[in-house]
Image: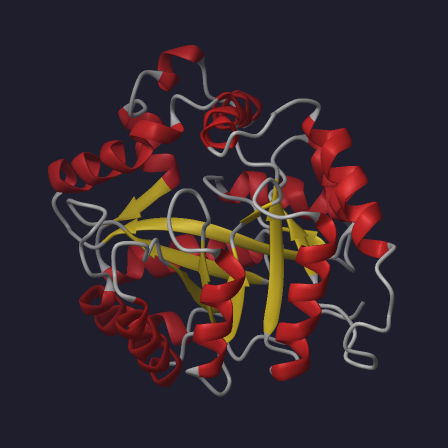
């Protein structure tokens, strides 16, 4: 499948679960007008991913919308495939289906079973492939990107999907991701940002952001593979880890980190604005950064 072009090289990743969907729809329209190329969101314990994607696609004209990620334990493979095809049929070229195995505690919260994540994802993709083309005939299916951090899931991103959506990674890991999936697959990477020139404020926001992630084995193992040590994996992460994963400083510092991911092989970089609380509105910072990020390539 050919990589669908993004209107620009930089998009937005936003944990918008605490905001009413009517407000998020309005925000999506503003982000489109500001020049951002896409809007992505997760699926942990908040809004259902495909429903939210449909609402945001309907509220915009050019913006790409991606799930980052749709939890495969939240719906069976047929529902994921049928839902993705239906969204793409309504909004051609604008929906991307990010898929992930999630994490043990989150799956257990859904009364699911978390085991053999690689085999589970491989089987899920095969079941999606088996869905009849009679569902939205002629529309095709949206690109599938896997939440791939380890080498085996990256290989599956290359052989059975359309690319990878790495989260909480350095530009060096983006380069390794590109090498693993090859030149023809898509790499859409998330980058946390703290819009402040005060290091203490930036570190506080970064540690708060990393607090839960630092308890999850998938991310801990990923950071060890990226060259960090057990000393960096204390609750909330070390300062070294925090500054490697969350960029802060002047606008040019933030743009430089985005460019580093693009230079490392990312097709598209998603900026995630971090405030003092998860419920902080990212739009003021995104408005401020939009002109510079639009020129990032």
Residue 25's image quarter?
bottom left
**Is residue 168 found left or right of 276 in the rendered image?**
right
Residue 66's image quarter?
bottom right
The answer to whether residue 37 is seen in the rendering is no
**Which residue sits furthest top?**
230
Quadrant of the rendering where the N terminus is positioned: bottom right
As rendered, which of 249 and 119 lies closer to the eye? 119
As rendered, which of 252 and 182 lies closer to the eye? 182
**What is the number of callouts on the image?**
0
* In this view, 133 is above or below 159: below
State the residue at coordinates (47%, 82%): 58
- Residue 144, given in percent of the width and then of the height, sits at 69, 57
Indicate how the structure is coloured in the image.
secondary structure
State the residue at coordinates (77%, 77%): 136
State the residue at coordinates (27%, 26%): 239
- Residue 76, given in percent of the width and then of the height, sits at 68, 47
As rendered, which of 280 and 77 lies closer to the eye? 77
């Amino acid at each position: 499948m050919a990589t669908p072009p993004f209107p620009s090289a930089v998009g937005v990743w936003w944990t918008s679960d605490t905001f009413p969907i009517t407000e998020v729809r309005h925000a999506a329209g503003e982000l489109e007008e500001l020049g951002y190329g896409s809007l992505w969101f997760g699926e942990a314990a908040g809004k259902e991913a495909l429903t939210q994607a449909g609402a945001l696609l309907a509220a915009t004209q050019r913006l790409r919308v991606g799930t980052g990620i749709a939890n495969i334990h939240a719906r069976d493979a047929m529902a994921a495939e049928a839902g993705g095809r239906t969204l793409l049929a309504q909004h051609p070229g604008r929906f991307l289906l990010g898929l992930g195995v999630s994490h043990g505690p989150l799956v257990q919260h859904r009364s699911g079973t978390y085991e053999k994540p690689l085999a589970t994802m491989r089987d899920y993709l095969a079941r999606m492939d088996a869905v009849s083309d009679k569902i939205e005939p002629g529309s095709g299916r949206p690109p599938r990107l896997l939440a791939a951090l380890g080498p085996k899931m990256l290989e599956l991103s290359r052989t059975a999907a359309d690319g990878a959506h790495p989260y909480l990674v350095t530009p060096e890991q983006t380069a390794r991701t590109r090498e693993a999936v090859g030149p023809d697959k898509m790499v859409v990477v998330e980058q946390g940002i703290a819009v402040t020139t005060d290091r203490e404020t930036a570190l506080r926001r970064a540690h708060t952001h990393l607090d839960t992630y630092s308890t999850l084995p998938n991310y801990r193992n990923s950071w060890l593979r990226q060259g960090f040590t057990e000393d960096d994996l204390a609750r909330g992460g070390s300062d070294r880890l925090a500054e490697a994963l969350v960029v802060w400083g002047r606008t040019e510092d933030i743009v430089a980190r985005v460019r580093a991911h693009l230079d490392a092989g990312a097709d598209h970089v998603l900026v995630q604005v971090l405030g003092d609380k998860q419920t902080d509105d990212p739009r003021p910072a995104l408005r401020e950064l939009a002109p510079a990020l639009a020129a990032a390539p």
